[in-house]
Amino acid sequence: MALQHPLPCKSSMAALILLLVGLLHITGVESIGVSYGKNGNNLPSETDTINLMKSNGIQGLRVYAADTTVFNALKGSNIAVIVDVSNPRLQELTDPGRAIAWVQNNIVRYYPDVNFKYIAVGNEVYAGNPDTARFVNFVMPALRNVHNALAAVGLQGKIKATTSTYSAVLTNTYPPNQGVFQDNAKGLMIPLVQFLAQTGNPLLASIYPYFSYIGNPSQIPLSYALFTDPNPNSVGYSNLFDALIDSMYAALHKAGGRNVPIVVSETGWPSAGHYAATMENAATYYRNLIGHVNGNAGTPLKPGRSIETYLFALYDENLKGGDPVENNFGVFRPDKSSKYQLNFN
């Protein structure tokens, strides 16, 4: 998860869903999971972490690299898993043979004991971001090779290969139906969208009202970002989360991906490190987000379509670099106590 998430200006029997704090089991489509970062020197073991998830009914997990210890802890849990091919490994997987080996070693070796759902081939790769621009030309070859490797072992459609993007690739996002990909994003996003439309795979997207709000606080009310009050200038949108998703959907439509679904593979609100990053705001955001997603209302552009969503992140991570807020996105503390008393029973 990166800090470059400001909103560009102009400018299913349904599975039990999950989450947090002594909490959860709700009836509905599977929709809420968590992301598992490990940038901390005080975090519980992988086995304790998966047991914590199971005891709280959390049914989805994103891990940012193939991890034998995590996969062994996940065996038999039926927790749905997103596993990333990390950006530094993308060039390696442009070799079809290495992609086959990656799938054999990291997926086939554990499947079906581990319930892999998506493979995110790259995370937030964008030509406009100097930290990830060098990976742009590797995403599509690696993605096609991973997809073909899954097909070769009979897993096409059972495990879906895609990538994860974020709101910085968009422009003209107000109103949301005017969203379009930035010119310097189209070289990757147009073939990506065409690939996803052909394969029936979703696009993973990081959706952060927090970063959009702090990037433009004079025009975005905090209450609109926290789901507590519609923005009177929001052209029919009751919250910023839906507006951000629909601006991505609008860009997908314009790129030939009208039927490509979006999975929110990251969203969250930090509890410290900035004036808007407070325990109260974070609790409000998570509480309202979970209620909104579990309501299955969809968004104005996609009404009635459930929004599969992964909260960032499972734990506070004390070794993350960058802005101080990056250490404070956990919904659990490293001692496994809950930060937010959310009750969905």
Image: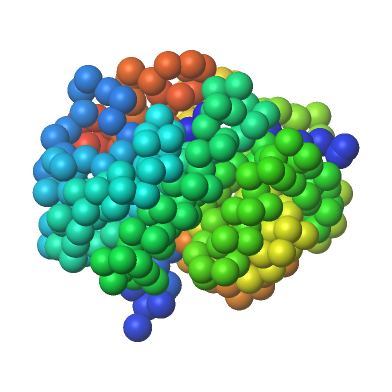
Which residue: 43% across, 35% down?
Answer: 91
Instruction: Point out residue 162 in the picture as x, y percentages from the top left corner.
Output: 47, 54
- Left or right of 88? Residue 107 is left
Image quadrant assignment for residue 224: top right
Q: Nearer the viewer, residue 65 or 235?
A: 65
Which residue: 33% across, 62% down?
Answer: 150
Which residue: 40% across, 30% down?
Answer: 88
Would residue 243 be visible to someone looking at this image? Answer: no
Instruction: Point out residue 312 in the picture as x, y percentages from the top left corner.
Output: 43, 41
- Left or right of 28? Residue 127 is right
- Left or right of 194? Residue 230 is right
Instruction: Point out residue 82 in the picture as x, y percentages from the top left corner.
Output: 35, 52
Residue at the farthest bottom position: 13
Across the whole image, how many numbered discs are drawn on residues?
A: 0
- Left or right of 116? Residue 6 is right
Instruction: Point out residue 264 in the picture as x, y percentages from the top left corner.
Output: 51, 53
Would residue 108 be visible to someone looking at this image? Answer: yes
| Way the structure is coloured | rainbow
Which residue: 15% across, 62% down?
Answer: 113
Q: Nearer the viewer, residue 342 or 85?
A: 85
Q: Is residue 197 above or below residue 224?
A: below
Q: Nearer the viewer, residue 189 or 213?
A: 189
Q: Is residue 335 above or below residue 172?
A: above
The C terminus appears in which quarter of the rendering?
Answer: bottom left
Image quadrant assignment for residue 65: top left
